[in-house]
Image (spheres, rainbow, N blue to C red):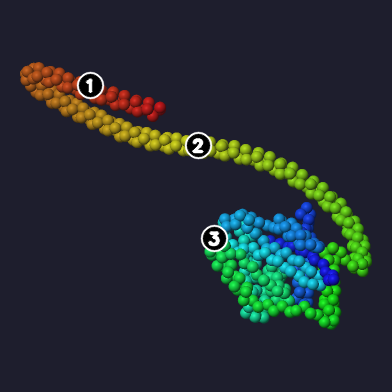
């Protein structure tokens, strides 16, 4: 009779986040899955549900239940493509543990047609598979440092890759996709090159004691981790209670100060509101005064424009008056010159007439003298002289008439000029 128990955990690694596929789906805040590592470099998963299993049927039932919750989506290459890694672990207490790992296939984003969310999923899948490939290569090369911590997938599979386990890898091939088949074969060939040497689990009493001690230490670590997540020890509870009392006292004091500060803030707020109202009133008064000043300024500007127009008109009229005065002065100067010419002409005519009269008078005197000398001749000549005198008188009358006409014309022109100046 062998006493053993079988427990199953079913985890999903989606976008580098661990999810418990056996957790209650109606729980909006499920327990967070964490991975802890002890001093012996052993990884422990905290927060995962361990479902008890008594028969193979129970195991298949749990497997189907968890598989239905996996992240899958349709791509151009697969109608139900896995978008995550799943880790189905059966733990047989004191006997054995079997881990079945279903790795999601590596995807070429351009060929699978994945976009947005599906493209990010493919990126995380390819990244974790790439990390697993680097770990396998490092183990084959016997390197000192193995990068298990670069991915949660490699941390979970660390015991399967280098522990006391028998590890088998099964690859799926398809003639429909040549490139993917070749890549999968290359990946499997590289994993097959890894040599794992499992040891027979034969323990001496000393080994059994050490194993129990390790189990106790592991359970204590789990308990401590559980306390960190769910609760604390009693001693810490008393300490925290005292601290909470102190914090409550400080909180009450701070609350009183806060209330006082709130009253002061309310008073300051009322003062600010009053000042803001005064400022608003002053701003309104200032705007009204500015509007009045703008109206006055606009009126003054209008009056100034009118004054400028009137001044320009006055200057233009002044220029016209000056030009007219200059023209009148020029006309008056011309008229004065004409009058002087007329006067000089009249004086010349008068002088000429006076000379003619004197000459005629001298001629008459000469003729009278001749008459006195010769009476006889005088009688003869008197007729001629009378005729000549008549002719001369006619000439004198004509000259005087012409002179008077000229004087009359000159006086009319002078009168016209005088009237023009008066206008």
Classify mark 3: helix, strand or loop: loop
Contact? badges 3 and 1 (CB < 8 Å): no
Q: Which residue is mark 2?
A: 309
Alpha carbons under labels 2 and 1: distance apart: 60 Å
**Residue drawn at 20 percent across, 20 percent down:** 397
**Residue drawn at 53 percent across, 36 percent down:** 306
Measured as percent of width and height from the top left, residue 336 is found at 32, 33
Q: Quadrant of the N terminus?
A: bottom right
For the residue carrying disc 2, how many other residues have a C-alpha within 10 Å: few (<14), some (14-19), or many (20+)? few
Which one is nearer the viewer's eye here, 255 or 204? 204
Alpha carbons under labels 3 and 2: distance apart: 99 Å
Mark in the foreground, 2 or 1 = 2
Classify mark 2: helix, strand or loop: helix
Measured as percent of width and height from the top left, residue 221 is found at 83, 71
Compared across the picture, whether 258 is left or right of 295 comes to right
Mark in the foreground, 3 or 1 = 3
Q: Earlier in the sequence, mark 3 or mark 2?
A: 3
Task: Tell me if residue 292 comes above or below residue 207 in the rendering.
Answer: above
- Of all residues, the one furthest to the front in this rendering is 1
**Residue drawn at 9 percent across, 19 percent down:** 384
Q: Which residue is mark 1?
A: 401
Corner quadrant of residue 394? top left
Classify mark 1: helix, strand or loop: helix
Res 347 seen here:
no
Contact? badges 2 and 1 (CB < 8 Å): no
Which one is nearer the viewer's eye here, 320 or 423? 320
Which one is nearer the viewer's eye here, 168 or 139? 168
Res 10 seen here:
yes
Corner quadrant of residue 339? top left
For the residue carrying disc 1, how many other residues have a C-alpha within 10 Å: few (<14), some (14-19), or many (20+)? few
């Amino acid at each position: 009779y062998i006493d053993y128990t079988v427990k199953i955990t079913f985890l999903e690694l989606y976008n580098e986040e661990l999810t418990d596929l056996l957790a209650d789906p109606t729980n909006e805040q499920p327990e967070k899955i964490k991975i802890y590592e002890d001093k012996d470099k052993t990884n422990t998963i905290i927060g995962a549900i361990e479902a008890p299993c008594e028969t193979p049927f129970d195991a298949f039932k749990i497997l189907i239940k968890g598989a239905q919750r996996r992240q899958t989506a349709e791509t151009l290459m697969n109608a139900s493509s896995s978008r995550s890694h799943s880790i189905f672990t059966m733990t047989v207490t004191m006997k054995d543990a079997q881990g079945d790992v279903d790795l999601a296939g590596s995807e070429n984003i351009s060929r699978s047609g994945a976009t947005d969310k599906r493209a990010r999923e493919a990126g995380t899948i390819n990244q974790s598979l790439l990390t697993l490939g680097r770990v396998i290569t490092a183990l084959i090369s016997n390197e000192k440092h193995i990068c298990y911590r670069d991915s949660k997938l490699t941390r979970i599979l660390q015991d399967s890759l280098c522990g006391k386990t028998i590890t088998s890898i099964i690859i799926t091939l398809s003639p429909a996709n040549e490139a993917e088949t070749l890549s999968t074969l290359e990946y499997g060939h590289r994993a097959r090159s890894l040599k794992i040497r499992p040891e027979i689990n034969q323990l001496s009493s000393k080994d059994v004691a050490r194993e129990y001690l390790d189990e106790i230490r592991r359970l204590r670590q789990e308990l401590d981790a559980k306390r960190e997540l769910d609760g604390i020890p009693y001693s810490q509870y008393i300490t925290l209670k005292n601290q909470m009392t102190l914090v409550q006292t400080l909180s009450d004091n701070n609350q009183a100060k806060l209330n006082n500060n709130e009253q002061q803030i309310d008073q300051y707020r009322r003062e600010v509101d009053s000042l803001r109202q005064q400022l608003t009133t002053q701003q309104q008064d200032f705007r009204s005064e500015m509007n009045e000043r703008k109206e006055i300024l606009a009126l003054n500007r209008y009056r100034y424009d009118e004054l400028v127009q009137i001044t320009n008109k006055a200057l233009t009229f002044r220029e016209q008056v000056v030009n007219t005065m200059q023209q009148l002065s020029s006309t008056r100067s011309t008229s004065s010159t004409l009058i002087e010419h007329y006067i000089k002409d009249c004086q010349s005519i008068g002088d000429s007439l006076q000379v003619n009269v004197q000459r005629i008078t001298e001629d008459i005197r000469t003729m009278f003298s001749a008459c006195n000398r010769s009476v006889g001749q005088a009688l003869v000549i008197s007729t001629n002289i009378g005729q000549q005198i008549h002719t001369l008188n006619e000439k004198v009358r004509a000259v005087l008439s012409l002179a008077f006409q000229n004087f009359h014309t000159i006086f009319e022109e002078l009168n016209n000029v005088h009237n023009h100046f008066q206008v």
